[in-house]
Amino acid sequence: MKALRSRGFTLIELLVVIAIIAILAAILFPVFARVRESGRATACAQNMRQITMAFLMYADDNDGRLPGTQAYRRTAEIYGQIAYGDFSTGALSKYLTTKVLLLCPSVSAKDKQWFRDNFRQDLLFNYSVNGYTTYAGCSGENGDRYKAHIMGLKLSIFPEPSRTIHLVDENVRPNIDSTLSQYIVNNELFFLDDVTSDKHSGKANVTYLDGHVGQVPGMSQWRTARWPDGSYMFHGEPLNP
């Protein structure tokens, strides 16, 4: 009786197997990447909702007035800084337990290098406040003629909070003060197509003043995108850039 001999793969068979594996990898890897990004986008939206809810809880405890942000008189822009300096003593510290919420999970490794303890101001955040919800007049700080703190507006002045943007997920970039000053709009809306992030499959997460989360087109698409009635809502009435 002849002994059976095991037969190995021929070269052609091996190449066919390798080709099949390569095809499957090409199909599945992008799917896995999209699933991971979808998870990060969801986590980002949850972060933003918690931040906006912190603003709303602050307003509930302070006669309906939203917390203000820091501004500089030397510029025309309204800088919507969520946090500045020592986060633990800020207006939102009672309502936000960790500053990690201020950072989108999809921020690149290059941007994350700014998030380290040896910075003079240990803050990294890429969620910007709509400046039109924070400006109710400036009050001086220790006689500094350049700096002022902005008093937040009352929620009651916004007729359509469910359509009024509060936070935007944007790009991270440092400024000369070793803090990351983030802003969404200025009086002329010059920066709308510069700062909005499109990390989440070409879109950016946003929150609205009623606390819900949505998505809008990112970056350059801002100027061509419109709400159904052809307007943006930033400061209580339609805004047409």
Image (cartoon, helix red, strand yellow):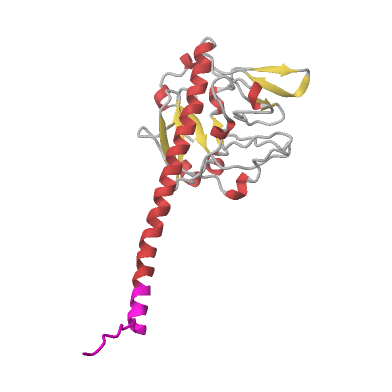
Vertical placement of 53 versus 221: above or below?
A: above
In the figure, residue 216 lies in which quadrant? top left
Q: How many labels does the image show?
A: 0
Q: At which x and y percent is residue 182?
A: 61, 35
Foreground: 98 or 64?
98
Q: Residue at x 56, y 25 (%)?
A: 97
> In the image, is 8 to the left or to the right of 170?
left
Q: Which residue is drawn at 45% across and 38% down?
A: 43
Residue 8 in view (yes/no)? yes
In the figure, residue 212 lies in which quadrant? top left
Q: At which x and y percent is residue 126?
A: 57, 37
> In the image, is 189 to the left or to the right of 156?
right
Residue most extreme to the bottom = 2
Residue 189 in view (yes/no)? no
Residue 158 counted in the magenta span: no
Foreground: 163 or 103?
103
Vertical placement of 179 versus 6: above or below?
A: above
Foreground: 170 or 1?
1
Q: At which x and y percent is residue 148?
A: 70, 22
**Which residues are drawn in magenta?**
1-19
Q: At which x and y percent is residue 198?
A: 48, 45
Foreground: 92 or 162?
92
